[in-house]
């Protein structure tokens, strides 16, 4: 892509919008632990732009900033926790979260970096829809620990789990800034938090019945979510510190997946929500 394009982005609550205008050509997936924890998903996808080409358009809620390394300044919406652009001081560039871009661009990731840090529960091969085979094979018993990017949130999970699930709905994509959200549903009795709720911010999406979550107020990482009256807690898989003996069992809302995600393996996919028995 050689012509100048305008890429617009926004957070989930709509309080923060931004834009980049230049020749956009570099797009990549990053599997480093910091990107995984910040996005709380399997991996992050970024589009590179120049600082001179980038601008914040509207900022109704404060943009929270935090260094994850000496040169990597990350940002997120203080209201909804959405992953926002990152400033790489070493390379003097802005990294736009691809999942948060609201305009069509035709770009596809040209590389995967930090592949030595890919968690064992995620395979990079894509998906084969309309099959329910192998879901049980990707479930199992485990004891794992997890934490947010800054360490303010820590927890552990134990017992039998039904595998890790990926969600391609637009809400999860915008919030994480990535291609899809990944989570481990666990029984509430199997979840042991080791943090005070005061370090988190709770967000309810206006107009939705169930879409709510909490995130670390300091770094933006998703916190495990417990829904009132529910039997299971939702653990953001990207925050796991130890690899559970689980696989990605299936994707939901795959009909809403982004065009730049390349399908192609035998992971089970459902265009919308899965059947009640899955």
Image (cartoon, helix red, strand yellow):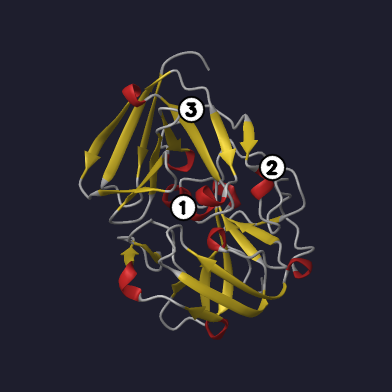
Q: Position of residue 10 (x, y in %)?
A: 34, 42
Answer above or below: position of 61 versus 159: above
Residue displayed at 51% across by 50% down:
34
Which comes before the other along the chain, label 2 or label 1? 1
User: Can you tell which quarter of the image residue 109 is in?
Assistant: top right
Q: CA distance from mark 3 to mark 1?
A: 24 Å
* Left or right: 125 as drawn, with respect to 19: right
| Mark closest to the chain's N terminus, 3 or 1 | 1
Q: Is residue 84 above or below residue 162?
A: above
Farthest residue to the left: give it.
60
Q: Which residue is mark 2?
A: 263
**Residue topped by disc 3:** 105
- Name the residue nearer the viewer: 75 or 261: 75
Q: Residues within 10 Å of mark 2 (few under 14, many from 20)?
A: some
Pick the residue in front: 215 or 168.
215
Residue under circle 1? 38
């Amino acid at each position: 892509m050689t012509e100048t394009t305008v890429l617009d982005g926004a957070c989930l609550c709509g309080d923060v919008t931004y834009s980049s205008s230049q020749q956009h050509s570099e797009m990549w997936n990053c599997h480093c632990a910091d990107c995984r924890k910040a996005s709380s998903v399997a991996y992050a996808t970024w589009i590179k732009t120049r600082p001179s080409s980038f601008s914040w358009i509207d900022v109704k809620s404060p943009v929270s900033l935090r260094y994850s390394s000496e040169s990597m300044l990350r940002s997120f919406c203080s209201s909804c926790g959405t992953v926002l652009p990152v400033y790489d001081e070493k390379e003097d560039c802005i990294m736009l979260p691809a999942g948060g871009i609201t305009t069509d661009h035709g770009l596809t990731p040209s590389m995967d970096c930090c592949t030595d840090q890919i968690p064992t529960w995620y395979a990079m091969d894509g998906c084969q829809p309309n099959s329910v085979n192998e879901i049980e094979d990707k479930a199992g018993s485990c004891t794992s620990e997890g934490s947010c990017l800054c360490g303010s949130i820590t927890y552990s999970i134990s017992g039998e789990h039904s595998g890790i699930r990926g969600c391609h709905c637009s809400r999860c994509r915008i919030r994480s800034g990535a291609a899809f959200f990944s989570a481990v549903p666990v029984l509430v009795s199997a979840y042991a938090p080791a943090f005070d709720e005061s370090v988190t911010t709770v967000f309810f999406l206006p107009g939705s019945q169930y879409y709510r979550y909490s995130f670390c107020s300091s770094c933006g990482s998703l916190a495990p979510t417990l829904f009132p009256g529910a039997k299971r807690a939702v653990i953001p898989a990207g925050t796991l510190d130890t690899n559970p003996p689980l696989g990605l069992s299936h994707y939901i809302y795959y009909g809403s997946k982004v065009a730049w995600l390349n399908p192609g393996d035998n992971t089970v996919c459902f265009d919308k929500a899965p059947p009640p028995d899955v």
